[in-house]
């Protein structure tokens, strides 16, 4: 099977660094996180039993500014995954022109097994025990297993500790506690903007069929937006499994079904499929929007899509990418495609620091401008260097980080 996600990130760093002629000392610094926090959270459960949860936070690199974003509460969380996610966030911020470094963290837990009281207690305990935090240090955002609700709890806990209000200290909050409009949909919306630009750039047919693995905030947002543009969505999957319809799914009805049942499975008029089979359905565009390493050397040859939009972090392993390149598949890298949330989190922090809040049209216009600029820069570098879009995106990011490190006297 595939390497762990951190090794995948390091492989890309090595390839892009060599092609982009990046200073070797930059590569050396970026080959490991700046800081790693690993700690335990003891908690009394509703049953009276004591459980001890493993927690992590990685400050990967802060050459461009304070670290920030996602906090993941999942049962299989491990340090290598957190390191990889923090690294990708560092690269994402640089690609998108966000003046921030990359951070990532979370707790090894299945939130579905917790009561509301246990869940809130664990979230508050995480932010309380986090050694370094604040608007100018480390700004946690949401990820898998967290949401606007958890981020509001984090903000409240942080402000109780600090003794003053600081809306810029936590990202992905509800608007009611000074979050940004468009925050929850930002990754999917940004990915949609990039997808439409790619479709135009590569002259992809408006009759293209699309399959989407993952139907959370990201997957459901991009799916709905593409459906409104008239594209045929033939397959969708979530944590419980997938569904397929050769004639295309009615996404508005599917969204209502998910609101009522919680999952896509059981949607009338569809054929049930596994998430593994979903990746291999006959389609022109594949959107992996779930978790990392789902496309690997054992299944890459069975992919039938001609365009893969990486909405998840690291969905394609290094080995699989080589196979797909030989097949002529176009891959738009995660660090570009799913950078919408990183961009809007930057907007959210700016709004919180200035106490000036933008309407949704302003947020989305600024997001579109920022993410399409990054896309065009990626295309330009890929053509100049005669390399893949992934390497090009990383080269652009590494050059920005290199300049910051030089200015700081690190290299």
Image (cartoon, helix red, strand yellow):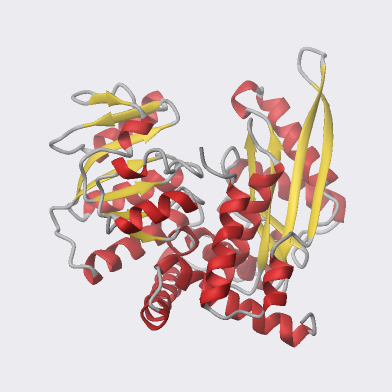
Q: How many marks?
A: 0
What residue is drawn where x is 26% and y is 37%? 235
What residue is drawn where x is 67% and y is 67%? 101
State the image coordinates of residue 160 (x, y, percent, origin top left): 83, 49
186 on left or right of 144 = left
State the image coordinates of residue 31 (x, y, percent, origin top left): 70, 63
112 on left or right of 240 = right
What residue is drawn where x is 45% and y is 69%? 367
State the image coordinates of residue 361 (x, y, percent, origin top left): 40, 67
Instruction: Residue 21: name its quadrant.
Output: bottom right
277 on left or right of 268 = right
- Point out the image quarter for the C terminus: bottom right
Question: In this rendering, does residue 64 appear at all?
Answer: no
State the image coordinates of residue 313 (x, y, percent, origin top left): 51, 51
Nearer the observer, 357 or 204 = 204
Residue at the bottom extreme, as displayed: 407
């Amino acid at each position: 099977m595939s390497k762990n996600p951190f090794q995948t990130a390091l492989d890309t760093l090595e390839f892009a660094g060599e092609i982009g002629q990046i200073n070797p000392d930059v590569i050396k610094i970026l080959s490991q996180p700046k800081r790693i926090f690993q700690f335990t959270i003891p908690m009394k459960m509703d049953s009276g039993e004591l459980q001890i949860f493993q927690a992590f936070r990685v400050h990967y690199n802060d050459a461009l500014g304070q670290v920030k974003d996602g906090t993941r509460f999942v049962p299989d969380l491990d340090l290598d995954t957190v390191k990889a996610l923090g690294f990708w966030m560092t690269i994402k911020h640089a690609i998108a022109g966000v003046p921030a470094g990359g951070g990532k963290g979370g707790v090894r837990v299945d939130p579905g097994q917790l009561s509301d009281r246990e869940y809130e207690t664990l979230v508050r305990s995480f932010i309380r025990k986090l050694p370094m935090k604040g608007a100018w240090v480390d700004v946690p955002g949401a990820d898998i297993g967290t949401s606007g609700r958890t981020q509001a709890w984090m903000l409240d806990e942080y402000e109780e500790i600090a003794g003053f209000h600081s809306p810029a200290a936590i990202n992905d909050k509800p608007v009611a506690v000074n979050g940004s409009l468009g925050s929850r949909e930002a990754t999917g919306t940004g990915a949609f903007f990039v997808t439409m630009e790619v479709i135009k750039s590569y002259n992809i047919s408006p009759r293209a069929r699309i399959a989407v693995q993952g139907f959370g905030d990201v997957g459901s947002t991009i799916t709905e937006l593409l459906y409104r543009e008239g594209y045929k969505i033939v397959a969708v999957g979530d944590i419980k499994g997938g569904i397929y319809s050769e004639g295309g799914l009615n996404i508005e009805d599917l969204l209502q079904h998910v609101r009522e049942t919680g999952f896509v499975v059981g949607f009338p008029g569809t054929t049930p499929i596994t998430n593994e089979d979903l990746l291999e359905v006959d389609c022109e565009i594949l959107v992996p929007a779930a978790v990392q390493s789902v496309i690997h050397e054992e299944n890459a040859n069975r992919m039938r899509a001609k365009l893969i939009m990486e909405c998840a972090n690291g969905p394609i392993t290094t080995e699989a990418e080589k196979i797909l390149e030989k097949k002529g598949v176009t891959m738009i890298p995660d660090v570009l495609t799913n950078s919408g949330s990183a961009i809007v989190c930057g907007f959210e922090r700016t709004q919180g620091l200035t106490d000036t809040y933008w309407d949704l049209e302003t947020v989305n216009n600024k997001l579109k401008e920022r993410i399409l600029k990054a896309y065009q820069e990626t295309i330009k570098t890929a053509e100049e260097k005669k390399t893949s879009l992934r390497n090009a995106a990383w080269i652009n990011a590494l050059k920005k980080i290199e300049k910051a490190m030089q200015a700081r006297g690190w290299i």
